[in-house]
Each structure stands twice: as C-alpha cells, then as structure tokens.
Image (tube, grey):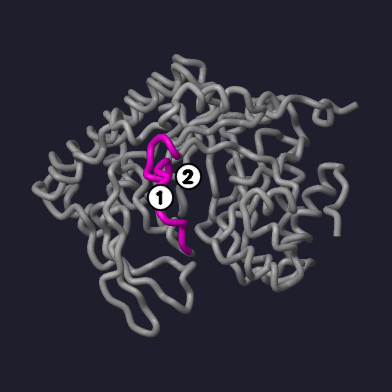
Amino acid sequence: MNDSNKPMPNRDRFLAICHFERPNDVSIIDWFNRYWTETPAAWVKQGAPKEILTPEGFNQYFQFEHIHNLQEIVSEHNRTDLPETEAGESFYVTPPIMPVFEKKVLREDERHRVELTYGGATVEISKEHPWRMPKYLEHPVKDRATWKEYKKRLDPYTAERWPQDWYGFVDKVNGEDTPTLLMLEGFFGILREWMGVEKLLYTFYDDPNLIEDMMDQMLYMMMGIARRAVRDLRIDCIRFWEDMAYKTGPLISPAMFRKFMLPRYRVVTDFLRSNGIDVLHIDCDGKIDELIPLWLEVGINFHWPLEVAAGMDAVALRKKYGKQLILSSNIDKRVLLKGKDAIREEVMAKVPFLLEEGGYFPGLDHGIPPDVPLENFRYFINLLREIGGKDKLPE
C-alpha cells in the first residue's frame, strides 16, 4: 500500500503532508476551499440540500476535511453577544480589536447601505451584491490621536478576548483529532485595514515612528496571545494574514519589509519554532514573488491562496524552492465559470505534479463566488477525489 493511503490520525496526517512525508495524498481541507457568504444559498436553488447553508453541512456535503481555526481568541468572533454575521461582513470587520465598536447603519437608500463596522470603519455596501467588497468611506486611525485611542483595544490580556472557560476550551481543542490553526494576524495588512492603503503608504514616509508604534503594539498583542495559547494548546499551524500585494507586486518594497516587518516577525517566529511549531502559514493575495524569500528568512513557509490572476504559479514555486515551501490552492477559480474541459485542463496541469512532489493542499485560489455553478464545483471536487483514488461525491 502507498504510504499516502495508509490511515493516520487527522492531525498527524496534516503535519505529515506539510513535512513532505505523504506524497500523492489528496487532502481537501475546508479552509483552503472557502466560499463567499451567498454561495450556499445560490447552490440550494440549483439542487443542493439546505444543509449546506451551515458551515458544518457545507463541509459534510462536499466531504471536506476540517481545520480548526482558533481565530476566536484574537478577535471579536469570540463574543456571543454579536448578531449573526451578514453577507459580505467578513470582508470589512477588523478582527483583532476588543472591545469592538457598536455596529450601526448610518444611512441607506434603495441600492446602498452606509454603516459603521465592528472594526470602526465606515463602509458603503451594495444591497444588490452584498457579498462583494464594500467601499471604504472612512478608516478609524487617521493620526496619532486616533491611534492612541484605538490601540487600547489591542490588549492581549483583555478578559473578553479569551474563552470564559479557558481550560474547558483547551480540553476540547486538544481532545479533537483536527488540525489546529492559530491566527496571529500580521504587521501590514491589519494596519492597512485601520488606515486605508493610501494613508498607510504615505505614513511610512511622513511618520515612520507611528508605523513603528503600531507594529510594536501588534507584536505585543501577538506575543501575549502566542505565549498563552502555545503553553496550553496543541497548535499544529500558525496563520498570519497580510494582504500586502496587488496584481503586479508588493505594496511596499522588500527593503521596507526588511526594515519594518522582518525584525518583528523574527521575534514571533523564533518563539514559535522554539516551541516546536514549524508550519507557519501566510495568507496574502496578489503577486508575492518578491516577498517569499523574506518570509522564508524568518521561517514562514506555507502560502495561500497563490492567486493565478496575479501571476502566481505553484508549479514554478515548487521547482524553484523545492521543499522549503508548503503550498496550497492555486487553482484558478475563474475556470469554474468556463466548464468541465477548462476545469480539467487547469487541474491536470498542476495538481498531479504538486501532489507527487508533496507538501501541497489542493484548492481554489480564493473563495468560491456565488456565480460558480454547483455542477462545476462538484466536478472540480470529484476530479480531485479521482486523482487521490477516492470515490466520487454521492449524488
């Protein structure tokens, strides 16, 4: 029997794939195949069961493997008094603050709604397409004075940040045979959310000391969370979120990354690796070729989503970096609109090679939009299952 087909506990199997010990093992994980909020409802209209309207039902229907994302201990998602998430909201909530702002509608008309988000931003949302990115009208951090107030919400030791029954939470997480991912945010992407891209980029030049202070506060929060979490929880993977690149390259130069971000990343990653955590995942859209060597320098070795529209190519990365990188996704989501032939061509050009080399988790290069037909997505998943020697999804 091929080692990749031997049964193995889920957490051990996840780490074995990350460590290139199970080539050709097809692990289709929910987190690497995320979907837009409106997608399940669109697919129910196309014949999918109503059970897919819940995350658990969605994963069960497509037989996804689950990775447990411990985002709740760094963000407002841990709170039980927040209303149910609305379509598109995940794209404009700033995760790490506690307490959050009071969300409220400021004004609206037939086509748009303007509201204050939990993260303190003012955004305009399309009522016709609420799952699309909103238009940012105002950001919460504008200068030193607004930052001084905002940073009070970034204390890692705020009681509400942590599950109330911490040791019950620890026992539950450690007792589950599910890969466990701890989110620690990052140093650029979150500042961009607070200030907006243009204001942030000018601030790097106009007031670099303010940038330093903001990043230092993030470092303080990340380390406070990491110390407690790593002490008590079995953590399999760390996730950083940056989104600091666009279609043709990074939003700041590698030299600026090295000056502002690299020393702070090193503090965090040295701590994690000293505690035996060597699967360090970065979530960054756009063209990141110039950033990969910098992340590797501090031990960040796992990349998602490898956006095809920005020119990212997982096959080329594997040939260039070998086993230095763990790779995920990189299947162009746009082909799911083109039909089965285009899907097969895209998958077969990448997935068999990447699986044979190892250290790869197949998936789309971002969330699944609701205009993707259910039939095409099922075909995509069944094709991955076929490559992995698994039975097709039940009808």
The location of residue 146, given as percent across then percent down, is 13, 50
> Is residue 326 shown left or right of residue 239?
right
Q: Residue at x 71, y 35 (%)?
A: 357
Residue at the spot of label 1: 243
Vertical placement of 359 versus 136: above or below? above
Q: Residue at x 30, y 35 (%)?
A: 261
- Asked if labels 2 and 1 touch by Cβ distance under 8 angstroms, the answer is yes
Q: Residue 127, located in which quarter of the rendered image?
A: bottom left
The location of residue 135, given as percent across then percent down, is 34, 69
Quarter of the image that includes the C terminus: bottom right
Q: Residue 178, located in which quarter of the rendered image?
A: top right
Quick check: can you spot residue 126? yes
Few, some or many residues within 10 Å of mark 2 (<14, 14–19, 20+): some
Q: Secondary structure at mark 2?
A: strand
Taking depth in this image into account, of 114 and 12 the one nearest to the observer is: 114
Q: Which residues are magenta?
A: 72-86
Badge 1 or badge 2: first in the primary sequence: 1
Quick check: can you spot residue 319? no
Q: Amino acid at mark 2?
A: Asp
Q: Residue 355, located in which quarter of the rendered image?
A: top right
Q: Amino acid at mark 1?
A: Asp
Quarter of the image that includes the N terminus: top right
Q: CA distance from mark 1 to mark 2?
A: 7 Å
Residue at the spot of label 2: 283
Queried whether the magenta region covers residue 384, the answer comes back as no
> Is residue 268 shown left or right of residue 62?
left
Taking depth in this image into account, of 61 and 288 the one nearest to the observer is: 61
The location of residue 259, given as percent across then percent down, is 25, 35
- The disc label shown at residue 7, or none: none
- Dominant SS of magenta comes to loop
